[in-house]
Image: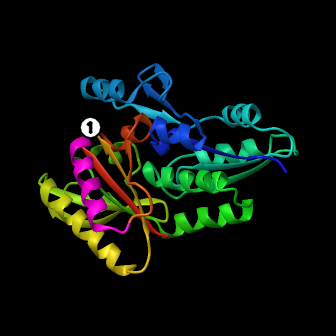
Amino acid sequence: MGKIHVVTDSGSDLSLEVKERLGIHVVPLTVQFGSEIFKDGEEMSTSEFYTRLKNEIEMPSTCQPSPADFVAMYEKIAQPGDTIISVHMSSKMSGTYQSAVLASTMLDSSVTVKVVDSKAASMGLGLVAVTAAQGVQAGKELDEILSDVQHTIDHLQVYFVVDTLEFLKKNGRIGMASALVGTMLSIKPILTLVDGEVAPFEKIRGKAKALKRVRELVVEFQEKFPEKKIRAAMSHATTSEEATQIAEALSRILPLEGEVLIGEIGPTIGVHTGPGVIALFLFAM
Protein backbone atom coordinates (compact mmCIF):
# COMPACT_ATOMS: atom_id res chain seq x y z
CA MET A 1 0.00 0.00 0.00
CA GLY A 2 1.37 3.43 -0.97
CA LYS A 3 1.98 6.39 1.27
CA ILE A 4 -0.43 9.26 1.85
CA HIS A 5 1.03 12.77 1.53
CA VAL A 6 -0.52 16.11 2.54
CA VAL A 7 -0.05 19.25 0.45
CA THR A 8 -1.41 22.73 1.11
CA ASP A 9 -0.61 26.26 -0.05
CA SER A 10 1.00 29.29 1.55
CA GLY A 11 -2.43 30.65 2.48
CA SER A 12 -2.47 28.15 5.36
CA ASP A 13 -0.12 30.26 7.54
CA LEU A 14 1.21 27.17 9.32
CA SER A 15 4.39 27.61 11.33
CA LEU A 16 7.57 25.92 10.13
CA GLU A 17 7.54 23.76 13.26
CA VAL A 18 4.05 22.41 12.53
CA LYS A 19 4.80 21.78 8.86
CA GLU A 20 7.98 19.88 9.67
CA ARG A 21 6.47 17.92 12.56
CA LEU A 22 3.48 16.77 10.53
CA GLY A 23 5.18 16.45 7.16
CA ILE A 24 2.94 18.98 5.38
CA HIS A 25 4.21 20.18 2.00
CA VAL A 26 3.46 23.74 0.84
CA VAL A 27 3.08 25.16 -2.67
CA PRO A 28 3.56 28.94 -2.45
CA LEU A 29 1.50 31.65 -4.05
CA THR A 30 3.37 34.65 -5.42
CA VAL A 31 3.12 38.24 -4.20
CA GLN A 32 3.63 41.12 -6.61
CA PHE A 33 4.75 44.63 -5.74
CA GLY A 34 4.72 46.59 -9.01
CA SER A 35 6.87 44.61 -11.44
CA GLU A 36 8.57 42.59 -8.70
CA ILE A 37 7.29 39.08 -7.99
CA PHE A 38 8.15 36.98 -4.93
CA LYS A 39 7.23 33.46 -3.79
CA ASP A 40 5.58 33.65 -0.39
CA GLY A 41 7.86 32.26 2.31
CA GLU A 42 10.65 31.44 -0.14
CA GLU A 43 11.63 34.78 -1.65
CA MET A 44 9.85 37.11 0.78
CA SER A 45 9.44 36.66 4.53
CA THR A 46 6.44 37.82 6.52
CA SER A 47 8.40 40.60 8.25
CA GLU A 48 9.77 41.83 4.92
CA PHE A 49 6.26 41.85 3.50
CA TYR A 50 4.72 44.03 6.22
CA THR A 51 7.66 46.43 6.17
CA ARG A 52 7.23 46.87 2.46
CA LEU A 53 3.44 47.05 2.68
CA LYS A 54 3.77 49.97 5.08
CA ASN A 55 6.00 51.89 2.70
CA GLU A 56 4.39 51.12 -0.66
CA ILE A 57 1.84 53.39 -2.28
CA GLU A 58 0.55 50.83 -4.78
CA MET A 59 -1.44 47.91 -3.38
CA PRO A 60 0.31 44.55 -3.90
CA SER A 61 -1.47 41.55 -5.40
CA THR A 62 -1.19 37.77 -5.29
CA CYS A 63 -1.17 35.12 -7.98
CA GLN A 64 -2.16 31.49 -7.55
CA PRO A 65 0.32 28.69 -8.29
CA SER A 66 0.10 27.31 -11.81
CA PRO A 67 -0.96 23.71 -12.43
CA ALA A 68 2.68 23.08 -13.37
CA ASP A 69 3.74 24.23 -9.89
CA PHE A 70 1.47 21.62 -8.36
CA VAL A 71 2.56 18.91 -10.74
CA ALA A 72 6.18 19.62 -9.80
CA MET A 73 5.35 19.22 -6.10
CA TYR A 74 3.23 16.11 -6.61
CA GLU A 75 5.93 14.41 -8.69
CA LYS A 76 8.59 15.37 -6.17
CA ILE A 77 6.92 13.76 -3.17
CA ALA A 78 4.92 10.82 -4.57
CA GLN A 79 5.80 7.39 -5.90
CA PRO A 80 3.52 5.11 -7.98
CA GLY A 81 0.72 3.84 -5.74
CA ASP A 82 0.83 6.86 -3.42
CA THR A 83 -2.06 9.19 -2.62
CA ILE A 84 -1.88 12.95 -2.16
CA ILE A 85 -4.44 14.92 -0.15
CA SER A 86 -4.13 18.47 -1.50
CA VAL A 87 -5.94 20.98 0.72
CA HIS A 88 -6.37 24.57 -0.41
CA MET A 89 -7.88 27.98 0.21
CA SER A 90 -11.55 28.58 -0.38
CA SER A 91 -12.32 28.45 -4.09
CA LYS A 92 -14.34 31.66 -3.58
CA MET A 93 -11.18 33.50 -2.51
CA SER A 94 -8.54 32.11 -4.85
CA GLY A 95 -8.03 30.08 -8.00
CA THR A 96 -5.48 27.92 -6.17
CA TYR A 97 -7.97 25.08 -5.69
CA GLN A 98 -8.77 25.03 -9.42
CA SER A 99 -5.06 24.95 -10.29
CA ALA A 100 -4.61 21.92 -8.04
CA VAL A 101 -7.64 20.19 -9.61
CA LEU A 102 -6.21 20.72 -13.08
CA ALA A 103 -2.79 19.50 -11.95
CA SER A 104 -4.37 16.32 -10.58
CA THR A 105 -5.50 15.43 -14.11
CA MET A 106 -2.00 15.92 -15.50
CA LEU A 107 -0.28 13.28 -13.33
CA ASP A 108 0.39 9.67 -14.14
CA SER A 109 -2.65 7.63 -13.11
CA SER A 110 -0.53 5.59 -10.70
CA VAL A 111 -0.65 8.53 -8.26
CA THR A 112 -4.05 9.48 -6.81
CA VAL A 113 -4.73 13.11 -5.86
CA LYS A 114 -7.67 14.12 -3.69
CA VAL A 115 -8.09 17.90 -3.96
CA VAL A 116 -10.01 19.51 -1.10
CA ASP A 117 -11.65 22.95 -0.99
CA SER A 118 -11.20 23.96 2.66
CA LYS A 119 -13.73 26.81 2.30
CA ALA A 120 -11.36 28.72 4.58
CA ALA A 121 -8.05 30.58 4.65
CA SER A 122 -5.15 31.21 7.00
CA MET A 123 -5.22 28.92 10.04
CA GLY A 124 -8.70 27.74 9.08
CA LEU A 125 -7.10 26.13 6.05
CA GLY A 126 -4.19 25.22 8.30
CA LEU A 127 -6.48 23.28 10.66
CA VAL A 128 -7.91 21.29 7.76
CA ALA A 129 -4.40 20.39 6.56
CA VAL A 130 -3.37 19.51 10.12
CA THR A 131 -6.41 17.23 10.46
CA ALA A 132 -5.32 15.38 7.33
CA ALA A 133 -1.68 15.13 8.39
CA GLN A 134 -2.50 13.92 11.89
CA GLY A 135 -4.72 11.24 10.37
CA VAL A 136 -1.83 10.11 8.20
CA GLN A 137 0.51 9.95 11.19
CA ALA A 138 -2.09 8.00 13.15
CA GLY A 139 -2.17 5.39 10.40
CA LYS A 140 -5.79 5.96 9.46
CA GLU A 141 -7.23 4.75 6.16
CA LEU A 142 -7.76 7.30 3.38
CA ASP A 143 -11.56 7.29 3.66
CA GLU A 144 -11.42 7.93 7.40
CA ILE A 145 -8.94 10.78 6.93
CA LEU A 146 -11.13 12.38 4.27
CA SER A 147 -14.15 12.01 6.57
CA ASP A 148 -12.25 13.77 9.38
CA VAL A 149 -11.22 16.50 6.94
CA GLN A 150 -14.82 17.04 5.85
CA HIS A 151 -15.93 17.20 9.49
CA THR A 152 -13.38 19.96 10.13
CA ILE A 153 -14.56 21.92 7.10
CA ASP A 154 -18.25 21.52 7.94
CA HIS A 155 -17.89 22.47 11.62
CA LEU A 156 -15.26 25.20 11.47
CA GLN A 157 -16.31 28.48 13.09
CA VAL A 158 -14.33 31.59 12.20
CA TYR A 159 -14.22 35.01 13.88
CA PHE A 160 -11.78 37.71 12.81
CA VAL A 161 -11.22 41.40 13.34
CA VAL A 162 -9.39 43.68 10.89
CA ASP A 163 -8.06 47.19 11.43
CA THR A 164 -9.55 48.34 8.13
CA LEU A 165 -11.77 46.90 5.41
CA GLU A 166 -9.80 48.70 2.71
CA PHE A 167 -7.49 45.79 1.89
CA LEU A 168 -10.40 43.34 1.56
CA LYS A 169 -12.27 45.86 -0.56
CA LYS A 170 -9.44 46.79 -2.92
CA ASN A 171 -8.45 43.19 -3.50
CA GLY A 172 -12.00 42.05 -4.18
CA ARG A 173 -12.19 39.65 -1.22
CA ILE A 174 -14.76 41.49 0.85
CA GLY A 175 -17.65 39.20 -0.14
CA MET A 176 -20.86 39.71 1.83
CA ALA A 177 -19.16 42.27 4.09
CA SER A 178 -19.29 44.91 1.34
CA ALA A 179 -22.24 46.59 3.06
CA LEU A 180 -19.93 47.57 5.93
CA VAL A 181 -17.65 49.69 3.75
CA GLY A 182 -18.05 53.37 4.50
CA THR A 183 -19.11 52.89 8.10
CA MET A 184 -17.53 55.01 10.81
CA LEU A 185 -13.82 54.43 11.37
CA SER A 186 -14.40 53.52 15.00
CA ILE A 187 -16.55 50.54 14.01
CA LYS A 188 -14.52 47.33 14.08
CA PRO A 189 -16.67 44.61 12.58
CA ILE A 190 -16.25 41.01 13.65
CA LEU A 191 -16.18 39.11 10.38
CA THR A 192 -16.71 35.43 9.66
CA LEU A 193 -16.76 33.03 6.72
CA VAL A 194 -19.98 31.69 5.24
CA ASP A 195 -19.53 28.92 2.68
CA GLY A 196 -15.98 30.08 2.05
CA GLU A 197 -16.78 33.78 1.65
CA VAL A 198 -16.15 36.75 3.96
CA ALA A 199 -19.32 37.85 5.72
CA PRO A 200 -20.20 40.25 8.56
CA PHE A 201 -20.90 38.78 11.98
CA GLU A 202 -21.31 41.77 14.33
CA LYS A 203 -20.46 45.47 14.36
CA ILE A 204 -18.54 46.59 17.45
CA ARG A 205 -17.29 50.07 18.37
CA GLY A 206 -13.53 49.90 18.94
CA LYS A 207 -11.02 47.08 18.59
CA ALA A 208 -10.70 46.40 22.33
CA LYS A 209 -14.45 45.80 22.57
CA ALA A 210 -14.34 43.66 19.45
CA LEU A 211 -11.65 41.42 20.94
CA LYS A 212 -13.59 41.22 24.21
CA ARG A 213 -16.63 40.13 22.22
CA VAL A 214 -14.55 37.43 20.50
CA ARG A 215 -13.73 36.01 23.96
CA GLU A 216 -17.45 35.98 24.78
CA LEU A 217 -18.16 34.15 21.52
CA VAL A 218 -15.66 31.49 22.56
CA VAL A 219 -17.66 30.83 25.74
CA GLU A 220 -20.88 30.70 23.72
CA PHE A 221 -19.29 28.25 21.30
CA GLN A 222 -18.19 25.96 24.14
CA GLU A 223 -21.68 26.02 25.65
CA LYS A 224 -23.09 24.66 22.37
CA PHE A 225 -20.86 21.58 22.66
CA PRO A 226 -20.64 20.85 26.41
CA GLU A 227 -19.56 17.23 25.98
CA LYS A 228 -17.02 17.68 23.20
CA LYS A 229 -13.36 18.51 22.90
CA ILE A 230 -12.53 21.65 20.92
CA ARG A 231 -9.75 22.23 18.40
CA ALA A 232 -8.59 25.83 18.22
CA ALA A 233 -6.19 27.93 16.18
CA MET A 234 -5.36 31.60 15.88
CA SER A 235 -3.64 33.73 13.30
CA HIS A 236 -2.47 37.30 13.48
CA ALA A 237 -0.83 40.02 11.45
CA THR A 238 1.64 42.15 13.47
CA THR A 239 -0.48 41.52 16.58
CA SER A 240 1.36 38.62 18.22
CA GLU A 241 0.85 39.89 21.77
CA GLU A 242 -2.94 40.08 21.39
CA ALA A 243 -2.99 36.63 19.76
CA THR A 244 -0.94 35.12 22.57
CA GLN A 245 -3.23 36.62 25.22
CA ILE A 246 -6.33 35.22 23.52
CA ALA A 247 -4.67 31.82 23.05
CA GLU A 248 -3.88 31.71 26.79
CA ALA A 249 -7.51 32.60 27.52
CA LEU A 250 -8.69 29.80 25.23
CA SER A 251 -6.57 27.32 27.17
CA ARG A 252 -8.37 28.33 30.36
CA ILE A 253 -11.88 28.46 28.88
CA LEU A 254 -12.06 25.49 26.53
CA PRO A 255 -11.70 21.72 26.89
CA LEU A 256 -9.04 21.73 24.20
CA GLU A 257 -7.90 18.82 22.07
CA GLY A 258 -4.19 19.58 21.77
CA GLU A 259 -2.58 22.99 21.84
CA VAL A 260 -3.89 26.22 20.35
CA LEU A 261 -2.07 26.48 17.04
CA ILE A 262 -0.86 30.02 16.31
CA GLY A 263 0.17 31.18 12.87
CA GLU A 264 1.43 34.51 11.59
CA ILE A 265 -0.54 35.77 8.61
CA GLY A 266 1.90 35.74 5.71
CA PRO A 267 1.92 37.65 2.41
CA THR A 268 -0.65 35.40 0.69
CA ILE A 269 -3.41 36.41 3.13
CA GLY A 270 -1.86 39.66 4.37
CA VAL A 271 -2.27 41.25 0.93
CA HIS A 272 -6.03 40.97 1.43
CA THR A 273 -6.33 41.78 5.15
CA GLY A 274 -3.49 44.20 5.88
CA PRO A 275 -1.79 44.43 9.28
CA GLY A 276 -3.53 44.44 12.66
CA VAL A 277 -5.62 41.29 12.18
CA ILE A 278 -6.70 38.82 14.84
CA ALA A 279 -8.44 35.63 13.68
CA LEU A 280 -9.86 32.72 15.66
CA PHE A 281 -10.78 29.28 14.32
CA LEU A 282 -12.71 26.64 16.30
CA PHE A 283 -14.41 23.33 15.73
CA ALA A 284 -15.88 20.66 17.97
CA MET A 285 -14.40 17.18 17.63
The residue tagged 1 is 238
**Number of residues whose C-alpha sits closer than 10 Å to that of mark 1, classed few (under 14), some (14–19) or many (20 or more):** some
Q: Is residue 199 left or right of residue 139?
A: left
Identified at 73% across, 64% down, the residue is 143
Q: Is residue 135 left or right of residue 271?
A: right
Image: 21 above or below 194: above
Determine whether the residue tagged by mark 1 lies in a helix, strand or loop: loop
Q: Using the rendered image of the protein, determine whether residue 41 is visible from the camera's viewpoint.
A: yes
Q: Using the rendered image of the protein, determine whether residue 165 is visible from the camera's viewpoint.
A: no
Rendered location of residue 129, percent (x, y)? 56, 51
The one of 284 and 71 positioned closer to us in this rendering: 284
Identified at 33% across, 48% down, the residue is 169
The one of 214 and 143 positioned closer to us in this rendering: 143
- Total label count? 1
Q: Which of the 4 image quarters holds residue 144? A: bottom right
Magenta-colored segment: predominant secondary structure: helix
Rendered location of residue 98, percent (x, y)? 64, 48
Q: Which of the 4 image quarters holds residue 68? A: top right
Identified at 29% across, 75% down, the residue is 220
Over which residues does the magenta segment extend?
240-255
Image: 244 above or below 146: above
Rendered location of residue 189, percent (x, y)? 23, 59
Image: 253 above or below 12: below
Image: 61 above or below 183: above
- The residue at the far top in this view is 36
Q: Is residue 41 left or right of residue 116?
A: left
Rendered location of residue 62, percent (x, y)? 47, 35
Q: Is residue 252 magenta?
A: yes
